Image (spheres, helix red, strand yellow):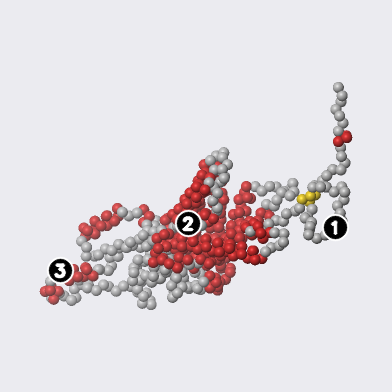
Amino acid sequence: MSGPSSLRDLYSSNAQTWSFAPPSNSSGPSSGPPPPPNAPSHTFSSRPVQNSIFELSPGLAEPGGVDLGLLLKTLVASAVLEYSTSAIAMPWEVGKCLLQVQWIPRDAGEADEAEPAAEEVAEVSDDDSGEESYFADPNNSGPSRYPAPRPADERGYIVRKNVLEEGTRPSYIIPVGSADGVWAMMKKVGRFRGEGWLALWKGLLTSCIVDMLSSTMQPLIHNALQGIFAPPLTSPYLLPATATTSLLLPVASHLITGFILSPLDLVRTRLIVQSFDPHHRTYSGPIDALRCIIRDEGGLRGLYLHPHLLIPTLLDNTIRPLMSLALPSLLSTRLFPGTLILPETSPTAFGVVEFASSCIGLLATLPFETVRRRLQVQVRGRAQPLKTCVEKRPAPYNGVVDALWHILTEERSDLPVQRALIRRGEKGKEREGEKGKGEEHVSVWRHTGLGQLYRGLGMRLGAGVIVFALGVVSGGESEAGWAEL
């Protein structure tokens, strides 16, 4: 047998290497020297990194340069789309915000026995005979025909005993407890004399600006943080990013974005809550609101670093992204262990996980959002009290914990609230019977303010059900815009 043939004859000293060269300009004559005869034949041109705005319109990234006209049209179309989306969702946002800010004390709707009714006075005058009334002793203290004078303050105004009193309620305030949901509040605002249907779009421009800046700044901040704390693995000495880093960086980007835009969120809340009546309106627009807040409430330092604004901002912008980013992965491992849940392969399972995580996230974030809205309505410094279109607490809250405690212990959650009228001329047995019958129908929410912390929960759950149904029907190919809307 012959030995194995030698591989020495197959050896070639001209080994071809890979190289990357920039693209050459084919329109003009080449000024460089011709390539050497042993130059490699495999050359690739480097591709520039495209921006997100160029990905929306590929015609902007042509080699000829950026078309300014097309760029301007793209920006205008994006702004119009964002404004239209905000305009569609704004009435629901206004109704939810007003429900969160509205203060409903537990004594609202309780019977008032101090004032006798006109029918009662008539019954007393008819039952008494003329002779007895003629020979009656004028010094005898009997039932008075005229009601006792109501207590007044130092300026002579009558003191309000109940927030449901029609005579002492300001004309620009919507009656307390008249709406039991977001849809009912929207109808109440539209039909109220001091508001009107256009009031459902209060703060629309500010809301649109906040949404546009948030969607633009958050990815930029996230990319900057990722470049600092989790750079690409260009060196073998760099450690890969862990799961904790991949979770903390998006949460930190949302937190920084929310902190930067917190003054605009404050302006949006106050524009929504203030009265729409020009005679009682505090701010004429977002610029005037921002100028007045800076002038009267401590400047930029008070606008950002006041504890009543800073702590709720940090809590709201930390818990919300943390729940939306961490809950889906945790629930998918619990509900579907050992299965990779993707919207393309398992749209139903993916929708179930997303819907469950959104429900749990709402239960955790809505109380802090409600407290943040109420603390934003409170003025500080030398600013005049804000005339709101809904009833607010007369005494200010002292912080997040104080607001949570007083909402739970001072308010009621059974809406709508109806005032009970009890006349002193009724018989004792009838009054006891009505009182016992009323105690049987008293709701559990009558003695707790827990429901006040979750105003707008039904609306958001309904939106989650719609998004889940759209995702199941479309097979996971629906856009994320439905969820935002």
Which residue does the image show at 84% across and 43% down from the upper left?
A: 15
Q: What percent of the width, then of the height, locates residue 86?
A: 52, 62
Q: Which mark is residue 127?
A: 3
Mark 1 Cα-neighbour bin, 10 Å: few <14, some 14–19, many ≥20: few
Mark drawn on residue 367: 2
- In this rendering, the count of numbered labels is 3
Disc 3 versus disc 1: nearer the observer: 1
Reply above or below: 225 against 350.
below
The amino acid pointed to by label 1 is: Gly
| Secondary structure beneath label 3 | helix
Instruction: Judge by depth and name the residue closer to the eye, 13 or 236.
Output: 13
Task: Give the amino acid type for the residue marked by disc 2 in the picture.
Answer: Pro
Give the labeled residue for mark 1.
32
Distance of label 3 from label 1 (alpha carbons) = 121 Å
Is label 3 in contact with label 1 (beta carbons under 8 Å)?
Answer: no
Give x and y (percent) for residue 46: 75, 53
Q: Residue furthest bottom?
A: 155
Distance (Cα) linking label 1 and label 2: 69 Å
Relative side of 1 to 167, left or right: right
Please report contact status of discs 2 and 3: CB closer than 8 Å, yes or no. no
Name the residue type under label 3.
Asp
